[in-house]
Amino acid sequence: MARNLKDALIEMAAHRFIMGKINELRKGVSTMHFLTGYKTYIVAVILVILAALSAIGIPVPGFDMEPGAAVTMALGLVFSRNGAKTEAKKIGG
């Protein structure tokens, strides 16, 4: 707790500075829209890359799928995303 006016003003300035930085960070997170519509495709590509590494014998920690199953899953992600976009366009207009 502030003992005098000077300490109170310093505390208030520090609080405003910290809250301003927190608000800037929050705005930065909410304005990252450049990945909208591509996240599913990015995940599918990563899945194919992991499957390829696994198929050529490079161990990937935490990845324990068969390469064929991983590629099939990646293709399923891509085609289901495309189908959902197509159906949404039909319904929306």
Image (cartoon, helix red, strand yellow):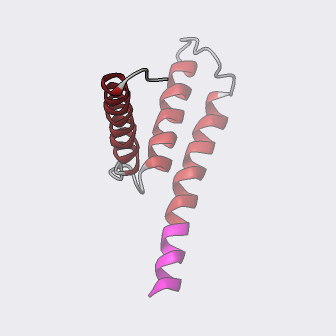
Counting every numbered tag in the picture gives 0
Residue 89 is inside the magenta segment: yes
Residue 67: give x, y in percent of width and height.
62, 29
Q: Nearer the viewer, residue 48 or 23?
A: 23
Residue depicted at x 53% and y 11%: 58
Which image quarter holds the C terminus?
A: bottom left
In terms of depth relative to the viewer, which is nearer, 69 or 35? 35
The residue most toward the bottom is: 93
Q: Percent x, y for residue 70? A: 62, 35
Furthest toward the front, the residue is: 4
**How far across and how far down the image is residue 60, in percent?**
57, 15
Q: Main secondary structure of the magenta part?
A: helix
Residue 26 lies in quadrant: top left
Residue pictured at 61% horizontal, 14% vertical: 61
Q: Is residue 66 left or right of residue 92?
A: right
Depth check, front residue: 66 or 4:
4
Residue at 65% x, 19% y is 62
Image position, residue 45 (x, y; %) = 46, 38
Q: Residue at x 36, y 53 (%)?
A: 33
> In the image, is residue 54 above or below residue 20?
above
Boundaries of the magenta span? 84-93
Where is 83 relative to 30, above or below? below
Name the quadrant containing residue 83. bottom right
